[in-house]
Amino acid sequence: MAERSFAKEVEKLRLGNGQAFKGEGILAVTKALLQSGVSYVGGYQGAPISHLMDVLADAQDIMAELGVHFEASASEAAAAAMLAASVNYPLRGAVAWKSVVGTNVASDALANVASGGVTGGALVIVGEDYGEGSSIMQERTHAFAMKSQIWLLDPRPNLTSIVDLVERGFELSEASNTPVMLELRIRACHVYGRFLAKNNLRPAFGLAEAMRHPVRDPDRIVLPPANFLHEHEKIDRRWPAAVEFVKRYRLNEFLGGSHGEVGIIVQGGLYNTLIRALERLGLADSFGETELPLYVLNVTYPLIDDEIVAFCTGKRAVLLVEEGQPEFIEQAINSLLRRADIATRVVGKDVLPRAGEYTGQTVKDGLTRFLATHAASHLQQSRPRAVDAAQANVHAPESSAAAQDKIVALKDIVPARPAGFCTGCPERPIFTAMKLVEQDIGPYHVSCDIGCHLFSILPPFNIGNTTMGYGLGMAGASAFQAAGARPAVSVMGDGGFWHNGLTSGVGNAVFNNNNSVLVLVDNGYSAATGGQDILSSRADNARRSTRHPMATAMRGLGVKWIRTVRSYDVAELRRQLSTAITSKTQGPKVIIAESECMLNKQRRVAPLLRKAIGAGERVVKQRFGVDADTCTGDHSCIRLSGCPTLTIKDNPDPLREDPVAHVLDDCVGCGHCGETAHAAVLCPSFYRADIVFNPTRRDRLVRRISDAMIGFLQRRADARRARFAF
């Protein structure tokens, strides 16, 4: 089951001409696809477009009514390969994935479709995951767009602009026979707004028609001699066609004042941030009205030479707000202006950071420095908002340093909170077992993978030496093959296994007879991307084929040593991992640690339990706790667990100073803390309590008998202690 359902929201996709569509950016994108007459949609989930894939999945009935095929692709490469349908046929298709990591996976197919070109409109929706909230390496989609000469759209983050650019993106692709990328930052994906809807369109040319009348055009296939001509076609025909289209339909926007000694060029996706910075300086209102001339690049590649020259002519300087590095746009504009013999100064990374996310404060500081040097009169006329009035010297370059000092001071008070596993996560006991094995036999190399399990690299586990990509955990350990040496251990999730790991990791290890150990996390979903079903999910899925065991797939490849263990059984995991590492058997050894993702389990089970309790049914919930009288205060359980519900509290014994372990009320009853204490032979202070809702007569009778027995034993113990009291 996905992280959340959009079953109610997708009904808005039925809105027609002139009706107001209100909602989130990802819903607007889906509506724009349907309004554009798209024939097929595919993609692979991953922030910040995970919810777009969930919306598409929930909207399949609506898409089916229009004859639109949707596919949750096995990987980004599989999604990109779908664009082959647009190569020879006037079929509009769209695919989506997560930023540069997804583009890297899809690069083979993308390079082919960009070289040969397309007949139907082909749109690639990329979640541009750049900035401090990202979990990946900091790179830009812009580089790939330039490398393969795929046109790159970067719409202003409002629903009208996003919808317009999706629709124009298909037209641009068809006009230039080139695939088009549309990048959406996380704020654009989740921005709320409204736009006037249009009717959804059935594809003018359907998939069935293309299948009935197949077309073959060798000139579209990347094979000699055609591939030698593709390069010339890109420059001689496709590029000019794209430039002409962008100019004719004014995809880039000239906003703000029409005259001035300075101006600002901004990527479309950063427009809202820029306006916020101008507003805080009193140079714009909250609706974006400003006297400063703005040139908004909703198309960041290709750049339109005529528009840039016209905007810069007569200006002393322009500020270029371009997030990330290298400064591709800044270099291109500088080169263009020098060739045109225009002396306008282009100011970019010399007043704005070379790297990192451009927050409102960052842009405000850079804008202040730019204006102070090139248009001081604007600063003298500006009226900073009240929110900035507390800053006595708003234009002083020390303001950012002072803010940074406050952040540093805050770090001395608030302890660091590294990202970690959720409460009850079935992956936590896996790494507890790995730490215990490390204590038993010594350190070993651990090759990690992309997914929730990557949190094991951080405290309290501190496990993992490398990570090389999604589904590449086992492949990352393939070089560690030395006779007589302790084998490397790799970790992989079930999502990564089906994405890439089965062939690149397991198949590679079998083929090369590698002596390596794989810990395969089977939590039932592609959990890190939002809980989507995968081939090995146990869930019944009306639209997908599930319940395909990973063990069966690996045996089919030739893996002979496979053990399956319940994730929460720390002792058994510890035993099997030790056996695998010390085994003399040559070849890959796989331990499948299986238990359902706790987040998905709670999403599935909690509503059912609440409903049952409300209906008066008998329900038993398990809770775990720590006997404060028994706890020694050693806290080994915490160091080996890291569960956020396992903490400390004051010792109730006045003769003991060390705080004792304590289980918070948000415990989900997974039992990991007790299993860890047992496996590590720690103190026997953990207990399990069964909480009974709507108890039966038998439950009440058992409770009375239990209370009576405990009371009798307690009174006898008290009497015995009284005889020895002074």
Image: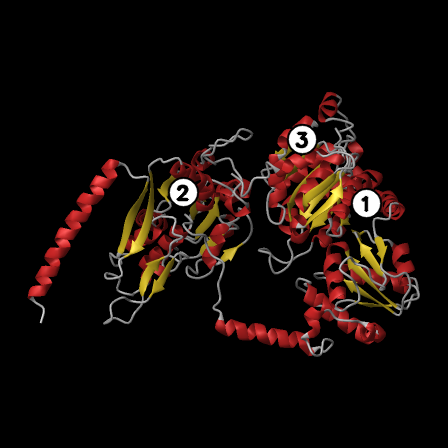
What kind of residue is marked 3?
Met
Mark closer to the chain start, 3 or 2: 3
Q: Say the numbered circle drawn on residue 63.
A: 3
* Front position in the image: 425 or 581: 425
Please provide percent x and percent y for residue 517. Answer: 41, 48
The structure residue drawn at horizontal position 56% and vertical position 39%, both measured from the top left corner, is: 5
Please provide percent x and percent y for residue 90. Answer: 78, 31
Mark closer to the chain start, 2 or 1: 1
* Front position in the image: 245 or 700: 700
Q: Is residue 180 left or right of residue 490?
A: right
Residue bearing mark 2: 595
* Front position in the image: 706 or 324: 706
Q: Is residue 478 visible?
A: no
The residue carrying pointer 2 sits among few (fewer than 14), some (14 to 19) or many (20 or more) residues within 10 Å by Cα, namely some
Q: Is residue 20 left or right of residue 545?
A: right
The structure residue drawn at horizontal position 42% and vertical position 57%, both measured from the top left corner, is: 644
Q: CA distance from mark 3 to mark 2?
A: 34 Å
Please provide percent x and percent y for residue 111. Answer: 72, 44
Q: Say the numbered circle drawn on residue 252.
A: none
State the SS at label 2.
loop
What kind of residue is marked 1?
Glu
State the SS at label 1.
helix
Residue, far top: 212
The residue carrying pointer 1 sits among few (fewer than 14), some (14 to 19) or many (20 or more) residues within 10 Å by Cα, namely some
Residue bearing mark 1: 231
- Evaluate if marks 2 and 1 touch, with contact meaning CB atoms under 8 Å apart: no
Q: Quarter holding the C terminus?
A: bottom left
Q: Is residue 512 above or below residue 278?
A: above
Please provide percent x and percent y for residue 321. Answer: 76, 62
What kind of residue is marked 2?
Ser
- Evaluate if marks 3 and 1 touch, with contact meaning CB atoms under 8 Å apart: no
Mark closer to the chain start, 3 or 1: 3
